[in-house]
Image (tube, rainbow, N blue to C red):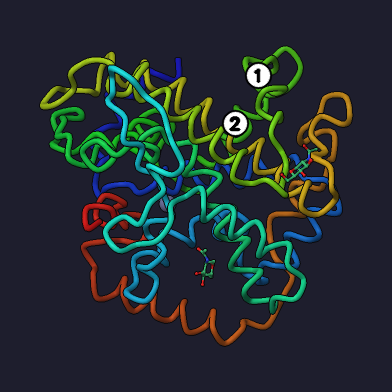
Amino acid sequence: MRLLPLAALSAGVLAPAAQAWGFLGHKTVALLASRHLLPETAVFVRSFLYRDQSIMDAAVWADRYAHVPFGRYSKGWHYIDARDEPPTWCGIQYNRDCGDDGGQGGCIVSALVNMTARLQDQTLPWPQRAQALRFVLHFLGDIHQPLHTEHLSRGGNGVHVLFHGRETNLHSIWDGAILEAVWGRGNDRVVAHLTNDLDGRLGPGGTYTADKETWRSCMNVSNTQDCALGWAGEANTYVCSYVLAKEVEGKELGGAYAHGAVPIIERQIAAAGYRLAGWLNMIVCGRHGLDELPGAGYTAYSGVGEDALFGVVEERHEEDVRIDRAIVEFEKMHPEVECDGLAFQGIRVQH
Ligand SMILES: *[C@@H]1O[C@H](CO)[C@@H](O)[C@H](O)[C@H]1NC(C)=O
Ligand SMILES: *[C@@H]1O[C@H](CO)[C@@H](O)[C@H](O)[C@H]1NC(C)=O
Ligand SMILES: [Zn+2]
């Protein structure tokens, strides 16, 4: 059913290239999470968003920031480069894979440790905690993208493939094109549609119901490194079991390969959104709060989901005004790179 539009939609889908989970993936992770926040957490999240900023916009900010010159220091925080040998063996080792890569310190695991701690640190000024929240919203998504946990060919950026006849690379289609070919480009209607669908699969009798216990098994915000390594390791297993299981270089991947990838991508996005909610609940309430009420999810906390969507803080802080202005200027100077198309491979290729 949903797979039918794959070929039909693909023509318009690929330009410009999508980025780290693309906007569709990141916004869906954030919207799905907002539906599983405890009421207190929803209030907390809103208090770190600007009035005109939705939780979905906040979740894509980190990719735009990584693109502007003074934000580039953060680009290595969007992935961890597992030096494994897919498809023969996969696996992440923190000391081996989270090193000082190309002069950029850290990786997505250390960044999540840092940002989780900064979000909890009440001595930090508001703008810095707000920034930490935006990073957490984003990195919980990226860490579930299998190719954000792989070193080979720069996370698949160097693997040339075809997608419905268009030349692209493996990383790019996993970030966005495969999912967008099924669901459409990431406008808010599409995001809501996908979120509703995934939330249904988390509900009673849904496809993911049995996975939830595993998904919420590591929720220790005092030990972020262990949890983040577990999530990254889980994503990384897909690199061997599917992403690079067969030779893909130069191949057309718009057909059977994409059809097989869709359930993996959707599952990873659902896991990311569910875990993001639990993670934020832990930070704010000291408990993950997931599935506390029967029929958990949007219906359980009716109203909370929508409440968590938009921020309440009116005044933009100086630093954020400066950063936002720079991002807008940068995107104007690079009109070929629309904001929706700040190609992650463009960022990543340089490391
Ligand atoms: C933590 O984040 C802050 C703010 O971006 C940064 O200045 C600092 O270098 C980071 N620390 C580590 C260990 O990554
Ligand atoms: C969470 O991690 C901390 C630090 O490693 C540890 O002391 C604590 O026991 C952990 N809590 C749980 C519930 O596992
Ligand atoms: Zn990213």
State the mark number for residue 211. 1
Q: Where is residue 309 in the image (x, y as percent from the top left)?
A: 69, 55
Crowding around mark 2 (Cα neighbors within 10 Å: few <14, some 14 to 19, many 20+) is many
Q: Position of residue 25 (x, y in %)?
A: 48, 41
Q: In the figure, residue 346 lies in which quadrant?
A: bottom left
Q: Position of residue 68 (x, y in %)?
A: 34, 72
Name which residue type carries label 2. Ala
Q: Are the residues tagged 1 and 2 within 8 Å (C-beta)?
A: yes
Q: Where is residue 97 in the image (x, y as percent from the top left)?
A: 38, 43
81 vs 303, nearest the viewer: 81
Vertical order, 103 against 293 (above or below): below
In the image, taking residue 198 as reference, residue 210 lies left or right, namely right
Q: Which residue lies furthest to the left in this view?
A: 250
- Give the residue drawn at x 25%, y 17%: 255
Vertical order, 269 against 221 (above or below): above
Q: How far apart are marks 1 and 2 (CA)?
A: 9 Å
Name which residue type carries label 1. Asp
Chain-order first, disc 1 or disc 2: 1
- Give the residue drawn at x 27%, y 22%: 244
Vertical order, 306 against 265 (above or below): below
* Residue 220 visible in the current orientation: yes
Is the distance from the Cβ of mark 2 to the nearest ligand 3 atom less than 8 Å? no
In the image, taking residue 230 as reference, residue 254 lies left or right, namely left
* Residue 13 visible in the current orientation: no
178 vs 73, nearest the viewer: 73
- Give the residue drawn at x 76%, y 33%: 297
Q: What element carries label 1?
A: helix
State the mark number for residue 271. 2
The quadrant of the image that shows the C terminus is bottom left
